[in-house]
């Protein structure tokens, strides 16, 4: 029989048995819950006050089929902290090692102090049970909240090795008691409470006298420096005072704070006015003050002595014996280095303040009385009158005892020392000279709470030396007050400064100057014709003019001038609207007579007045007779009444009042020379006749028409029209600086019937100036096509031009017309059609430009120049284009230095066969330095400078060819240069005007 169990069957059975056993044990292992504790590393660190900090971190790993619920736990602390250092412990639970992700599970109960057992129980207060998920990793943190007043240096922590956390679990699964694997260790370092630190030191306060009633006087400075960490906070300051003061001597002590040891910009904190006297403890409850790490604050204690405090009482704070104490909110570490660096303060009488009133520097006239040189104000306290017996101060300047007669001290209610405000006047000590200490002895009672002004005034001697000075330097004047010993002596706050200007002694002076007056022709019967005008400029003091005397010149007789009158006014023009007073007429006796006018008048300080001598010309005066005043040889004189003073007359009169010539009214006609010339076809405004009209006398005339007869061979149609122009010069350019500026003609005749016709130009009313010249220019506009050679001509001798006037015509008429206007020939074969010809001034040269539209057999242009529009000379030549109908532009620069006021130019257009024609005349008016000319050149001794506008010249230099300046003029250049001593050779004369423009001319110095 075979065995029931074979080896194979036995092996299979055993396998089944082992599988059963393994399954049984596996089921048993799965049912068991395991909780593993591991201490997280926490380095030792500092914990600031009033902060929450983790002191222990625990990692809890759960291995289970179901959640685990924690209902309580306990743990022991370590360190030397006390209950006052920690306000609470809290348990935090989170999913990871970051505290930021943890939630507070509740507060941990604690009996207090290092080594205590902390316990947590669910259901106590807000504490709730903690559920740990199956197969989860959890983190628990113990957090301590440090108090604001925690003591620095104390420690707190939890050692996982010796004070392991224990917990009670409750699990709803089949196995409520999990297996605990405790891997806690001493990886959590002790935490040290970090408290702030402060260092005290005393700021220096010098001993001083304090006027009664002075507020905010500094008594003590405490410097508080924060340490390296934390912020110290306090709200209470106390300190004990020293000195001899009583409760009635000090009104209040105050405390303020600042970032610097100064009350400037300080913030007031509080005050203590419940005072009992020296030795008391001042108690200040202040708003919470913070002293951050590494920052510095200053605490400043000030006092206000009472106005009725006793003189000599003292007060202060001794930082060494009675250090200032601070009540902190957070127990910082204190290092006290306070010392006795704040000296005692001594109470003195109530203050009076002295300050200087600003006064400008000025002039003091010789003989002036009560001239103010220094003013100061005295302000008393509101609690006490002041009695002053003497005031002394020191003077400055260059004066001597002969310049100042005496000093006085005026007392006034206003700083201006107005005469009506003077309350008292005290005579000073005898004058000895500059730098002296002058004193004024007189009792001055100054009422409390008032401001009084005192002015030091001087009486200047009549014979004082002009230019000497006197004054008072408020900043350095040895000022001293002597107080009445029978009254309380006040304290002196001297705030005087150097803001009172020096006074300079001057003489009373008036300045006479002649107003330029042009020579004129004066009509018979003219009334109040200006002869001489005197400008009178007064100095700083009022003067009284009494009589005026003046001597005449000329060759007039008593029958020529009916009388003279003297006018006084505010304008050099002596226009009647500006005249203030007129003298009675004085009959004339003849040239060379002395006229005396009585005209009392008070001329104010710095005023300017004008005195004008006027003549009434007889109606039957002899023409050609003259009258005037030579201000250089026979100056007008004015007498002044100035008792007690010396008056200086500064006479700047000159001979700039021209002689006046007696004449009759009338008009003179004359013909201006006009060269004969060739006129191109199509020429516009070709001058054919210029009439010079001179109106005599003071009255002008009003032109209404001009009539003239033509000559020549031109026929109807050859001249399209005639124009009439008015000009100040004989040319159409009118002396313009930059070309022609006449504008439209004053009359035009559009139809022309040919030579021999009468041209009548009816003009609008044209004013012709009195005693001046006007030029009336007749021009012709030539047709574009003319058959044969034709001429245009006006002969002023055989056919004089006549004028008509509106109103009264000038009479008589003097006709000096002549045949000075040359014949103008219309040449149909002219080589050039000239479109334009212009001249203008540019820098120190003249620029000529012209344009042609057609040139036929044109050889060249000759540029000609003249200074009188009559005699022309060639100065240059430019080649023409010979032929063509294209437009051509030409340019020429005349850079010669010329002295004439107006330069005239024309073109001579020369054909290949040497026939020629002239252009119209263009002119340039010279201005400023463009008129500069030096002569003679070459020169050997004296070089003369001829500049038309000499007033514009600011500097003259002579420069050699090496660039060295060998001569430079003074601020007021002379019109000559002495060449003696300069080596022979070439030099450049450079003349600069006020605008900085410079013109130069080369000269040769010959020996």
Image: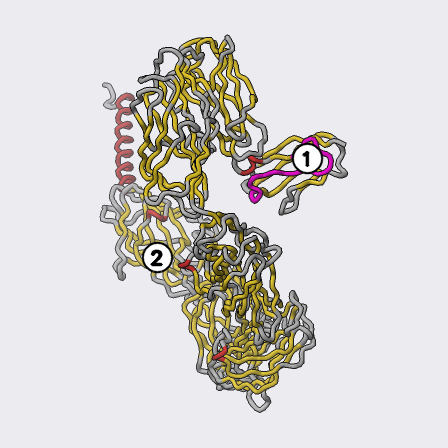
The answer to which of 771 and 874 lies nearer the viewer is 771
Q: Is residue 986 above or below residue 716?
A: below
Image quadrant where residue 374 sits: bottom right
Q: Residue furthest bottom?
A: 486
In this rendering, does residue 242 appear at all?
no
Which quadrant does the N terminus fall into? top left
Residue positioned 54% across, 50% down in the render: 659
Magenta-highlighted residues: 935-952
For label 2, count other residues whose C-alpha is less than 10 Å away and answer few (under 14), some (14-19) or many (20+).
many
Q: Earlier in the sequence, mark 2 or mark 1?
A: 2
- SS assignment at label 2: strand
How far is disc 2 from disc 1 in space, using C-alphas? Answer: 101 Å
Q: In the drawing, does residue 757 fall left or right of residue 352? A: left
Percent of width and height locating residue 288 = 41, 67
Which residue was labeled with disc 2? 90
Percent of width and height locating residue 709 = 36, 26
Q: In the drawing, does residue 832 fall left or right of residue 546? A: left
- SS assignment at label 1: strand
The answer to which of 747 and 954 lies nearer the viewer is 747
Which residue was labeled with disc 1? 959
The answer to which of 976 and 179 lies nearer the viewer is 976
In this rendering, does residue 11 appear at all?
yes
Percent of width and height locating residue 717 = 31, 17
């Amino acid at each position: 029989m075979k065995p029931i169990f074979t080896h194979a069957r036995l092996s299979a059975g055993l396998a089944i048995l082992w599988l059963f056993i393994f399954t049984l044990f596996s089921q048993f292992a799965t049912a068991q819950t395991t909780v593993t504790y591991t201490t997280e590393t926490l380095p030792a660190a500092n914990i600031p006050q009033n902060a929450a900090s983790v002191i222990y971190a625990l990692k809890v790993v759960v291995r289970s089929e179901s959640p685990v619920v924690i209902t309580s736990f306990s743990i022991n602390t370590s360190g030397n902290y006390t209950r006052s250092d920690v306000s609470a412990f809290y348990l935090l639970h989170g999913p990871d090692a970051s505290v930021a992700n943890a939630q507070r599970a509740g507060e941990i109960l604690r009996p207090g102090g290092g080594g205590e057992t902390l316990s947590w129980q669910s259901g106590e207060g807000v504490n709730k049970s903690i559920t740990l998920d199956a197969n989860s990793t959890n983190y628990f943190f113990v957090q301590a909240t440090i108090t604001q007043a925690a003591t620095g240096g104390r420690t707190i922590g939890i050692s996982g090795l010796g004070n392991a956390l224990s917990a009670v679990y409750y699990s709803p699964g089949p196995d409520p008691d999990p297996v605990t694997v405790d891997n806690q260790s001493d990886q959590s370092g002790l935490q040290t409470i970090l408290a702030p630190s402060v260092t005290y030191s005393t700021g220096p306060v010098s001993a001083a006298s304090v006027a009664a009633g002075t507020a905010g006087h500094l008594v003590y400075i405490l410097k508080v420096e924060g340490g390296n960490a934390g912020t110290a906070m306090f709200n209470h300051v106390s300190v004990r005072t020293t000195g001899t003061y009583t409760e009635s001597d000090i009104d209040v002590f105050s405390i303020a704070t600042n970032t610097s040891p100064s009350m400037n910009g300080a913030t007031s904190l509080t005050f203590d006015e419940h005072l009992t006297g020296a030795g008391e403890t001042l108690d200040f409850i202040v708003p919470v003050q913070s002293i951050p790490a590494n920052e510095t604050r200053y605490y400043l204690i000030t006092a206000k002595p009472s106005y009725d405090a006793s003189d000599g009482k003292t007060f202060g704070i001794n930082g060494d014996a009675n250090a200032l104490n601070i009540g902190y909110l957070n127990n910082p570490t204190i290092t006290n280095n306070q010392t006795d660096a704040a000296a005692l303060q001594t109470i003195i009488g109530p203050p009076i303040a002295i300050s200087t009133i600003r006064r400008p520097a000025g002039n003091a006239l010789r003989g002036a009385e009560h001239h103010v040189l220094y003013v100061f104000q005295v302000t008393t306290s509101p609690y006490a009158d002041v009695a002053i017996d003497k005031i002394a101060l020191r003077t400055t300047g260059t004066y001597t005892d002969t310049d100042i007669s005496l000093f006085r001290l005026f007392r006034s209610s206003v700083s201006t020392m107005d005469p009506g405000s003077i309350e008292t006047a005290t005579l000073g000590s005898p004058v000895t000279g500059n730098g002296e200490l002058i004193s004024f002895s007189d009792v001055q009672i100054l009422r409390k709470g008032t401001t009084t002004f005192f002015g030091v005034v001087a009486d200047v001697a009549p014979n004082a030396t002009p230019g000497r000075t006197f004054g008072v330097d408020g900043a350095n004047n040895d000022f001293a007050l002597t107080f009445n010993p029978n009254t309380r002596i006040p304290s002196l706050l001297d705030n005087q400064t150097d803001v009172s200007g020096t006074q300079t002694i001057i003489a009373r002076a008036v300045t006479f100057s002649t107003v330029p007056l042009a020579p004129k022709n004066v009509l018979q019967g003219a009334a109040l014709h200006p002869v001489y005008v005197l400008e009178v400029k007064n100095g700083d003091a009022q003067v009284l003019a009494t009589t005026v005397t003046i001597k005449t010149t000329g060759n007039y007789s008593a029958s020529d001038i009916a009388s003279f009158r003297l006018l006084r006014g505010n304008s050099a023009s002596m226009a009647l609207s500006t005249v203030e007073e007129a003298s009675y007429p004085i009959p004339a006796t003849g040239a060379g007579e002395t006229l005396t006018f009585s005209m009392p008048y008070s001329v104010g300080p710095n005023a300017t007045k004008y005195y004008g001598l006027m003549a009434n010309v007889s109606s039957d005066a002899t023409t050609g007779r003259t009258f005037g005043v030579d201000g250089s040889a026979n100056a007008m004189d004015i007498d002044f009444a100035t008792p007690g003073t010396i008056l200086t007359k500064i006479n700047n009169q000159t001979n700039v009042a021209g002689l006046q010539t007696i004449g009759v009214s009338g008009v003179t006609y004359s013909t201006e020379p006009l060269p004969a010339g060739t006129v191109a076809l199509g020429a516009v405004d070709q001058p054919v006749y210029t009439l010079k009209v001179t109106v005599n006398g003071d009255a002008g005339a009003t032109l209404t028409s001009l009539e003239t007869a033509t000559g020549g061979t031109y026929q109807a149609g050859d001249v399209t029209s005639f124009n009439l122009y008015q000009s100040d010069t004989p040319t159409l350019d009118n002396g313009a600086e930059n070309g022609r500026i006449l504008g439209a003609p004053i009359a035009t005749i559009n139809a022309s019937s040919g030579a021999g016709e009468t041209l009548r130009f009816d003009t609008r009313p044209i004013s012709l100036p009195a005693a001046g010249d006007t030029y009336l220019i007749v021009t012709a506009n030539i047709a574009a096509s003319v058959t044969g050679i034709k001429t245009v001509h006006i002969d002023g001798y055989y056919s004089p031009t006549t004028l008509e006037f509106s109103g009264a015509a000038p009479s008589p008429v003097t006709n000096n017309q002549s045949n000075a206007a040359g014949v103008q020939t219309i040449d149909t074969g002219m080589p050039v059609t000239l479109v334009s010809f212009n001249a203008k001034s540019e820098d120190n040269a003249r620029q000529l430009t012209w344009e042609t539209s057609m040139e036929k057999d044109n050889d060249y242009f000759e540029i000609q120049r003249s200074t009188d529009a009559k005699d022309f000379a060639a100065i240059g030549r430019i080649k023409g284009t010979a032929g063509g109908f294209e437009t051509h532009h030409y340019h020429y620069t005349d850079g010669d230095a010329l002295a004439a006021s107006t330069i005239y130019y024309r073109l001579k257009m020369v054909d290949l066969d040497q026939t020629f024609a002239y252009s119209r005349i263009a002119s340039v008016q010279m201005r400023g330095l463009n008129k500069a000319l030096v002569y003679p050149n070459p020169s050997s001794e004296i070089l003369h400078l001829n500049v038309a506008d000499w007033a514009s010249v600011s500097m003259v230099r002579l420069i050699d060819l090496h660039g060295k300046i060998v001569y430079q003029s003074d601020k007021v250049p002379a019109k000559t240069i002495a060449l003696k001593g300069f080596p022979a050779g070439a030099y450049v004369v450079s003349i600069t005007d006020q605008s900085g423009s410079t013109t130069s001319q080369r000269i040769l110095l010959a020996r």
